Image: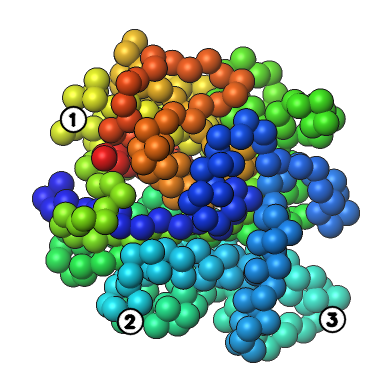
Amino acid sequence: MKTPIAVTSIASFSSLGKTSDDIWKEYLNPKSLIVEKQIGNTSALVSPLSETLANEVQTLRDSDVKYKSLDNSVLYAILASREAVKKAGWYNSKFGVNIGSSRGATQLFEKHHQEFLATGRTPTLTSPTTTLGNISTWVAHDLKSKGPELSHSITCSTALHALLNGIAWLQAGMADRFLVGGSEAPLTAFTIAQMQALKIYSNPKNCQLELGEWACRASDLTKTKNSLVLGEGAAMACLQRGEHKNALGYITGFGYATDVLQHSISITDEAECFQKSMKMALQNIDLDEVDVIVMHAPGTLKGDKSEYKAIQKVFSKNLPMLTTNKWKVGHTFGASGMLNLEMALLMMQHQQFIGVPFVTEQNPRKAIRNVLINAVGFGGNAVSILVSK
């Protein structure tokens, strides 16, 4: 890294909660936040916002006539971004915004398309409220930021690609501050049907939640069925050039790579994209100094095993402690990488490892100083970020 990149604040809005204290308490609780819920005409396993947070979203929607027509993905992003900027003390200052989403305005798109099929017409605001740039633009409007506004979609590695973009702008000297993250509101009938069609979604019949069975067995290499479950929410980080007294941690390495695909959702058996991205992120640190890896681990058979094999290839027998949060909060698609970063920073802050309840901890470490975060999406777009205390 030519210039230190500090994470001066991070905020999220998901089933884990919205304050750092509440989120940490949830991580200390070995109970999953996945429930069975009616989505359209289908009963599915999901990790939704609490009623309290859902009410906050509605309050935001009702607070401004311009917000009434916005998708939940935009409103989640606004709420998380407000908190991140508040923590960093960035109000009335110049900073860039790069917020992505895997699916974008899913709920609105489905709603307006159904109206079109039924009537042949669409509401006036259909196009502007379903465009991909909608999220960053509205966040920038809400925060009255004065810098560049970018949006993108790179499936499940979207948030970490936003972080890469922020690093690039800061390293180039084109900005001093950047707000980066991802937002996702995928708990819709059509989105879940797409995951079920891929045969990767967890089936309620395969688990008994009332008996304590985990619906998503992310990073469990002994499972015999796919167990992906969707969650919703947003997570944002404030990045600044140089060293700062209020830094939560520093980005000390980054890597990226893409697999050569056999088909549109494939990943190689040993996740070569992850091997390349991790090696790139770790080129300036001894492997023994990496204490934890927050895995992407979506809960699918192929995804979990291939990432684990990639970690073995890079670290050999001396593996760091391995963890993931998807067994608890589900897969939030484009927001998931930033939720992983938040988890990493919390473990560093509290100096306590948060493992997966049904997976044996590997090679316990005395301190948590360096954490590697992984994310990958359809298309084999892997990103690895090293964050240090």
**Is 57 positioned to the left or the right of 149 in the image?**
right
Q: How is the image coloured?
A: rainbow
**Disc number for residue 92:** 2
Spatial CA span between label 3 and label 1: 60 Å
Kind of residue at badge 1: Ile
**Is 124 positioned to the left or the right of 209 in the image?**
left
Mark 2 touches mark 1? (CB < 8 Å)? no
**Disc number for residue 203:** none
Residue in the picture at 38% in, 64% down = 87
Q: Nearer the viewer, mark 3 or mark 2?
A: 2
Q: Secondary structure at mark 2?
A: loop
Q: Is residue 176 visible?
A: yes
Nearest to N terminus: mark 2 or mark 1: 2
Q: Nearer the viewer, mark 3 or mark 1?
A: 1
Which residue is label 1 attached to?
A: 285
Q: Residue furthest left?
A: 2
Kind of residue at badge 3: Thr
Instruction: Report x, y in % for residue 220.
Output: 59, 21
Which residue is label 3 attached to?
A: 119
Asked whether 273 or 312 is in front, the reply is 312
Q: Secondary structure at mark 1?
A: loop
Asked whether 337 or 275 is in front, the reply is 337
**Is 230 positioned to the left or the right of 276 in the image?**
right
Kind of residue at badge 2: Asn
Residue in the picture at 71% in, 67% down = 55
